[in-house]
Structures are given as structure tokens and as C-alpha cells.
Amino acid sequence: MQEGYSRQKLIEERINKTKDAAVMSLKLIRQMVMDFLINQKGYHAEDIESDREFEIIMDDRKTSTSADYIIRLNAKRLIVIKCSPGALESRDRHLISFARVVDSHQIPFAVVTDGSHARLLDAVSGKLISEGLDSIPNRSEALKALNSIEFIPYPAERMEREKRILLAFDTIKCTEEACE
């Protein structure tokens, strides 16, 4: 009986160490991305919303969701950023759904990054624009782009479906991270 208990305890300790390492890795990625946005892309700290939570109402239930960073210029949310260690493509659809439903308009661009690589997506069309950290627009490019972007709401008839996609990904994320 004691051996079984010790083995269970060892397994739990290893799982906790793995979770702790993942949390530390994500913190490092987030810090690298913030430094990159400010020091290399020229954004000001006040341009960047961090860990902003949004309330999603669906089926008379309220749920909150968030992204790591949102770049906001001239009172418009322009770029949503998700930091993730590895498998960036697997985060695309989640972030596109997020960009489509959390604001009164669709956030036009979505970026998934691990701090070394990035995928820039057109959140309105759902298509990949480019890859690489350099593809993230700098502040002056983003300000210039504001003049030609039409900020439109996501179609009401497709909103519930998009919310379901977002919440499904959030549930998976919660399960992977044990809701911590």
C-alpha cells in the first residue's frame, strides 16, 4: 500500500513540475513579446492592453475570455496577440474567433507567437497574411493602416457559432492548464 502511495505522489510531483515549467515558459514568452513590441516595434506601453478580460454571453450564461495582448491605437483595437509555446498553427482558429466576437467590431489582425516565430492573420477573412516576427506591423505602419481599415462588426447571424468556437477552445485550454 505504501509503495502505491509513493508512486502516486511521485507522479503528482512530476505533473506539477511540468505545469510549473509550462507556466514559467509562458511568462518568459510574454515578457519577450512585450519587450519586442516596445523596443523593436515602437509601441508605447499605453498602446498595449495586457490580459484584458472580455465577457461572452451565450445561452444566458456569462463566461470570460482573454488574450495576452491587444494593441489599441486611436481608440481602436487593431491587433490581438496570443503567446503560446509551440504549435502556433493550432492556436489560429481560437484567436480568430476571439478577434471576431469580443469587441463591437472585429479586431482586424491576430498574431500567434512563441516569442521567436509569429503568424500574422487577417482575423476578418481568417487567412494567414505572413509568418515571422518581422511581419508584425510596427507602430507607424499600424497607424498608417488605420486609415484604410474598415472596422466592421461580425455578422449577427454567425455570432453564436463563433462564440461556441471560442468557448470550445477556452474549455480545452482550461483543461490543459487545469484552470489555473
Image: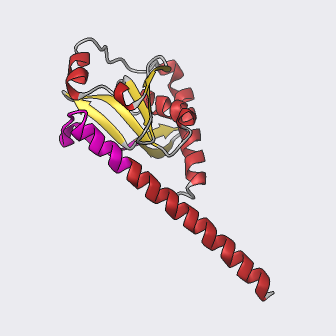
Outermost residue on the top side: it is 148
Query: How far from the left and from the top, in percent, is residue 142?
Result: 25, 23
Left or right of residue 78: residue 179: right
Q: Is residue 41 above or below residue 115?
A: above
Outermost residue on the right side: it is 1
**Closer-to-camera residue (37/123):** 37
- Magenta segment: does it hold 47? yes
Which residues are the magenta region? 30-54
**Closer-to-camera residue (68/56):** 68
Q: Is residue 36 above or below residue 132?
A: below
**Closer-to-camera residue (40/30):** 40
Q: Is residue 51 visible?
A: no
**Closer-to-camera residue (108/151):** 108
> Residue at the spot x=74%, y=82% of the render?
5
> Residue at the spot x=28%, y=38% of the render?
37
Query: How far from the left and from the top, in percent, is residue 19?
Result: 55, 61
Left or right of residue 168: residue 7: right
- Magenta segment: does it hold 102? no
Residue 41, image quadrant: top left
Q: What kind of colouring is applied to the model shown?
A: secondary structure
> Residue at the spot x=32%, y=18% of the render?
151
Query: How far from the left and from the top, in percent, is residue 139?
Result: 22, 28
Q: Is residue 17 above or below residue 172?
A: below
Q: How many marks?
A: 0
Q: Is residue 26 visible?
A: yes
